[in-house]
Image (cartoon, rainbow, N blue to C red):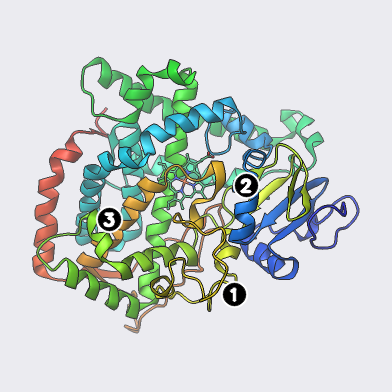
Amino acid sequence: RDPRLPPGPPTLPFIGNLHLFPTTHAHIKFTEWAHVYGDIYSIKIGPQTAVVISSPKMSRECFEINSATTSSRPESQVTDIIFQGNELVLSKYGPHWKNMRRAAHRLLNKDACASHLPLQHAESSLLMYNILEDPQNVYNHIRRYAISLALSVTFGIHCPTFNDSMVTELFDLNRELDKLVKSGGHPPVEIFPFLGYIPEQLSSWKKTCKNLHAKQHRYFFDLVERCLNRMKSGKLNGSFMEYLLENEAEYDFDREKTCYLGLSFITAGADTTASYLQFFVLCMLENPEVLVRAQREIDEVIGPNRTPELEDKERLPYIRAIINEVHRYRPIAPTSVPHAATADTTVKGYLIPKGSMVIMNTWGIGRDTELFDEPDKFWPDRYITSEFGIKPGADTTGFKDTVFAFGGGRRICPGNHLASNSIALNVMNLLWAFDFDLPKDPNTGLPVPLDTNDTTDDMLLTPKPFICDIRPRSIAKSEQIRKQLETVQPVLEQFEKSSQK
Ligand code: HEM
């Protein structure tokens, strides 16, 4: 290791720390290393360097103060084949990325998100109805909500049920992408680029990437086509694609780029929101005393006669604390999305060489015992006693109003307003409408414990499918949920149904 680099685990010749590099749940190992090597350390992966950032203070210095040189994404032969440089989340810093961000801002800025609220309210009403009618599938109903919202705002298409082929196909595409992209999912071509020269006949991963590209292309071009057809027949529904297809020149987009920006919103916006809400349900099951207190707050402020509105959040401090605590306790992107340095950069006196990967260890930040009391405990009160949930006297440098779960610097999640509105609305609605209990063993009748650590082994931290005992809090509330679905139907009907081709 170059002595100018941040410290890190001892290396072996040629492979560096490759033998130590975790292939699953990397955030756990990254956090262990942060305890030993501090809030900025380096890992050598063959000839490559990765720098891991594990405190708000260092995150500010690295991703904000030095954002001019830490805002790209790492080289990836795999995603180059799949996305061909046209997708937003993994694209390199440069003019096309800037155009995509500008377009994303138009759909996702705070004011634009206010105009998405009637749809979010309608979709959330449908979610409550679905859970009421079919509580066993709460996990899938949440996934439907998130996919349908992202598809409606982007492509103008609403998915009424979770077993709709558009929902299941998208889910399969995302799983396939995750499997391929994650560390260990393909040969280490990023570390040893010469492997990329091996011809396709001997590199099955290349064929798999091309197949996935073809499948994604078909799926998303079909959505664009449907939007064009609606536009031709004058059936506009205000989706973002309508605007983008009319204004491609303003962003220097061709049809391919337009389509792939739409894809970016769906791949980045659907599973993330779903995983957060699934974790929320699990956290309530794990912490019944928190659930009872949250419901008491809802009952006092909102009462039984109406469902919550987004503005109610301002009068619900304990529920706001729960929302922050779920983000800290189970961040769905525990190592964020890796950035890459486009020039040599100095942070805390250490060198981050051009081309290094720079990783925000979001999981580690939330587990820093200098900042958080008992970080492994789900304890929303920490956000009641302090704005950022930290101990009295702890250093607040680098904390800001958006939680670390949304990343930082120029690449910060542009969907954070849309996501935060979805989270607040659904958390309030679920607490207002339902009681949650652990599932019962059919033979013994005893509660079966669920574990928020039981996650899939993907890039995103996603709870494995679970069932729970979820039931309406009263007959009057059940009736209100049914009535509310009738009231919001006209909003949902503005969108083309996924199955109505
Ligand atoms: C709970 C929900 C969500 C979480 C926790 C989340 C988290 C993140 C994180 C950690 C990043 C990487 C930031 C970085 O590189 O520093 C990111 C990027 C991104 N997110 Fe989200 N996200 C969520 C929902 C959404 C939604 C709803 C959308 C849009 C519909 C969205 C669109 C994007 C896009 C386009 C990027 C790439 C930005 C870029 O690379 O410039 N996200 N998100």
Q: Nearer the viewer, mark 1 or mark 2?
A: 2
Residue denoted by label 3: 425
| Residue 490: image location, x then y, percent | 13, 39
Residue denoted by label 2: 65
Specify the quadrant that holds the N terminus: bottom right
Q: Is residue 278 left or right of residue 93?
A: left
In front of the other: 346 or 77 = 346
Which comes before the other along the chain, label 1 or label 2?
2
| Residue 6: image location, x then y, percent | 78, 56
Which comes before the other along the chain, label 1 or label 3?
1
For residue 97, above or below residue 372: above
Q: Is residue 206 left or right of residue 472?
A: right
Residue denoted by label 1: 369
CA–CA distance in space, label 3 to label 2: 34 Å
In front of the other: 298 or 344 = 344
Which comes before the other along the chain, label 3 or label 2?
2
Residue labelled 2 has its Cβ within 8 Å of some atom of ligand 1? no
What's the amino acid at mark 3?
Leu
| Residue 65: image location, x then y, percent | 62, 47
What's the amino acid at mark 1?
Thr
| Residue 352: image location, x then y, percent | 75, 47
